[in-house]
Image: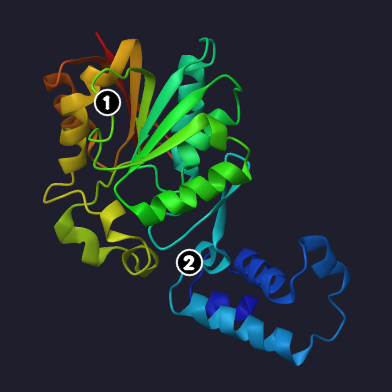
């Protein structure tokens, strides 16, 4: 299967072949190595073949397995959630730097998907509380499941709605985070098939210029940030200046751009004045 994946141009062929073999044979990595000389049963080979066919048709291995690691935690996926990406861990790392020393801070995550950002934050501090918002009820099902899975469900409240709509006017947060949809509507058809055919459109489509979500968030963020509150946003390639201008125009201050490990502009940090 590894060689088959390589011929298909899959960059991480060996890793993905191993993960699918573990799933098909229902073993962990060590057991797979220890039993590599054993003959597989026909039903196991049939299961492996079915998984391999799904991957060759362009379905990401994380969706086939139904889960993805993020911040050292495993998050279950469904059709309404994006696959958490390593770059998004920047929001968690910076969020911890900003509010780690505060007493009982409150955080708000907009467009939460799997809940990976607030759940990762909550896993680090026992006195932190969170509100997580998503427009998709199906996504919230996955997020609630992940919160229970990691033992933080009593400290996080899930609300369905668009951006700040489910948030009461008097609520204030020390940290607001979001990895919103930022792909231009007209370019979605050009994305890799793993993304185009398998990621939810609701979590991809950022409107004609890719900035619709940022405008919506920026317009109300100052109303819900506490006096020293911080807003963290993941951004797409080439969007840093445009989103910075949107944030400044909405009355936010100290807007800075941070790059990921690959050197790409990936996150914006803004503060309430």
Q: Is residue 223 above or below residue 146?
A: above
Residue 205 x, y percent position in the rendering: 22, 54
- Mark on residue 200? none
| Mark positioned earlier in the residue sequence (1 or 2) | 2
How far is the residue under mark 1 from the one under mark 2? 38 Å
Q: Position of residue 237 (x, y in %)?
A: 28, 43
Give x and y (percent) for residue 94: 46, 24
What colour scheme governs how the chains and residues are painted in the rendered image of this protein?
Answer: rainbow
Q: Nearer the viewer, mark 1 or mark 2?
A: 1
Q: Secondary structure at mark 1?
A: loop
Q: Quadrant of residue 66?
A: bottom right
Rendered position, 1 above or below 41: above
Camera-side residue: 231 or 235?
A: 231
The residue labelled by disc 2 is 60
From where the camera sits, is residue 244 visible? no
- Most extreme residue toward the bottom is 42
Image height check: is 243 above or below 54? above
Locate residue 264: give its quadrant. Answer: top left
**On screen, 253 above or below 239?**
above
Q: In the rendering, which numbered label is found on residue 168?
A: 1
Along the horizontal axis of the image, is 31 left or right of 133? right
Number of numbered tags placed on the structure image = 2
**55 or 177: nearer the eye?**
177
Instruction: Indicate the secondary structure of the residue bearing disc 2.
Output: loop
Spot occupied by residue 145 in the image (x, y as percentages of width and height): 54, 50
- Judging depth in this view, the residue of 222 and 13 nearest the camera is 222
Residue at 50% across, 79% down:
54
Question: Which is more toward the observer, 5 or 38?
Answer: 38
- Mark 1 surroundings: few (<14), some (14-19) or many (≥20) residues within 10 A: few
The residue sitting at 27% across, 60% down in the picture is 201
């Amino acid at each position: 299967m590894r060689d088959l994946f390589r011929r298909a141009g899959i960059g991480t062929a060996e890793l993905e072949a191993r993960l699918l073999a573990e799933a098909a044979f229902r073993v962990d990595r060590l057991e797979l190595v220890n039993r590599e000389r054993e003959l597989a049963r026909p039903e196991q080979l049939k299961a492996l073949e079915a998984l391999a066919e799904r991957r060759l048709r362009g379905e990401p291995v994380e969706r086939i397995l139904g889960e993805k690691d993020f911040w050292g935690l495993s998050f279950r996926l469904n059709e309404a959630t994006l696959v958490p990406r390593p770059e998004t861990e920047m929001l968690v790392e910076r969020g911890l730097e900003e509010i780690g020393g505060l007493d009982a801070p409150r955080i708000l995550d907009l467009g939460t998907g799997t809940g990976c950002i607030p759940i990762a934050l909550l896993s680090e501090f026992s006195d932190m509380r969170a509100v997580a918002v998503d427009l998709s009820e199906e996504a919230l099902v996955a997020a609630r499941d992940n919160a229970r899975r990691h033992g933080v469900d009593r400290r996080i409240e899930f609300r369905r709605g668009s951006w700040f709509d489910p948030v009461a006017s008097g609520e204030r947060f020390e940290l607001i985070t979001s990895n919103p949809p930022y792909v231009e509507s007209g370019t979605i058809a050009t994305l890799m098939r793993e993304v185009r055919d398998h990621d939810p459109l609701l979590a991809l489509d950022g409107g004609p210029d890719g900035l619709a979500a940022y405008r919506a968030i920026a317009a109300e963020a100052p109303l819900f940030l506490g006096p020293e509150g911080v807003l963290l946003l993941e951004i797409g390639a080439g969007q840093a200046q445009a989103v910075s201008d949107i944030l400044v125009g909405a009355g936010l201050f100290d807007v800075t751009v941070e790059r990921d490990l690959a050197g790409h502009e990936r996150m914006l940090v803004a503060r309430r004045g």
